[in-house]
Amino acid sequence: MRKFKTGLLLLISAVFTFNFANSQEEQPTMFVVHTDNVKFEMMPKYEELSLKFKTMCEENNVKDMNWTTISVEDGRYVHVTPIKNMAELDENPMAEVAKKVGEEKMNEMFDEMDDCYDSHSNEIIHYMPTLSYIPEGYSTQDKNQREYHFLYYAPKNSKAMGEAMTKVKEMFKEKGVKNGYEVYHSGFGSEESYYMVAIAGASEMDIVKGGEENDKLLGDEKDAVFWDVIKLTTRYDQVEGNLRPDLSYWPEE
């Protein structure tokens, strides 16, 4: 388990926090996602250990890794890292930590963390800049609330689903909607094909207010455009989450 856990920590880096509004073409588009399905009664312990690991990295000025943590309402803690290719998965980001703090001390902490959940998973996802709507001036800075919409579909409808998602973006652009959204697509390791639409806000109410403003701008035309997506969707999930700067780590340059 220790060796497996060490490998999994390669997956920790940044999670849906990039500001695509500024330099969309420079942002990574391939990510590896690691999810810990933390038991509700163990969430305080999991967060305590997460903070302990962050402090460990800060005190030892670790440069070879960084991460952003997001907690989901159903107990999931999701960690994502951008990668350029699959070969990066062979690298060991824990080497610097183990060298500075000692492998035994590091593994003891990870063993405690393993007690906080009974399962975890990994998959690759892809950011879709051609389907994401990032209007001029839009930014996710200081917007730590997230609303994620998962739209599952049958593989045979892949082309049609992509075309339907494109029409949604075109409608938002034509109507001059000010609130942006990011779109991700499932990849290697995903059991089903899906698009995930990520919406950012300062709070749940902020996201709700933004949705109401969008509805007014889009008008009745939105019903037919959204229906083209809905009719191809085999399953739909919506989850709420929060970016956790308190559990995240960014080394100084």
Image (cartoon, helix red, strand yellow):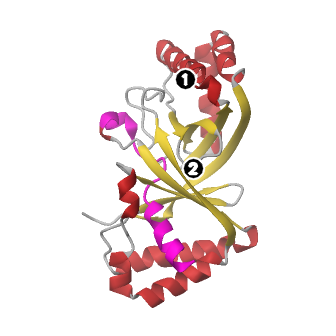
Identified by mark 1, the residue type is Gly
Query: Residue 40 colored magenta?
Result: no
For the residues labelled 1 and 2, the Cα–Cα distance comes to 20 Å
The part of the image, by quadrant, that contains residue 129 is top left
Numbered disc 1: secondary structure: helix
Q: Residue flagged by tag 2: what amino acid is it?
A: Gly
Give the mark, 1 or 2, whose residue is nearer the N terminus: 1
The mark found on residue 189 in the picture is: 2
Q: Quadrant of the C terminus?
A: bottom left
Q: Which residues are magenta?
A: 1-25
At x 51%, y 29%, the residue is 179
Q: Is residue 23 magenta?
A: yes
Name which quarter of the figure residue 238 lies in.
top right
Q: Is residue 230 visible?
A: yes
Q: Which mark is residue 162?
A: 1
Please tell me whether mark 2 sits on a helix, a strand or a loop. loop
Q: Is residue 175 above or below residue 23?
A: above
On screen, 9 above or below 53? above
Camera-side residue of 52 and 113: 113
For the stretch drawn in magenta, what is the main secondary structure?
helix
Residue drawn at the location 59% of the way across and 31% of the way down: 210
Q: Is residue 139 above or below residue 244?
A: above
Q: Is residue 33 left or right of residue 30?
A: right
Along the line of sight, which residue is nearer the eye, 41 or 210?
41
**Relative image position of residue 171 (x, y in whole percent):** 53, 15
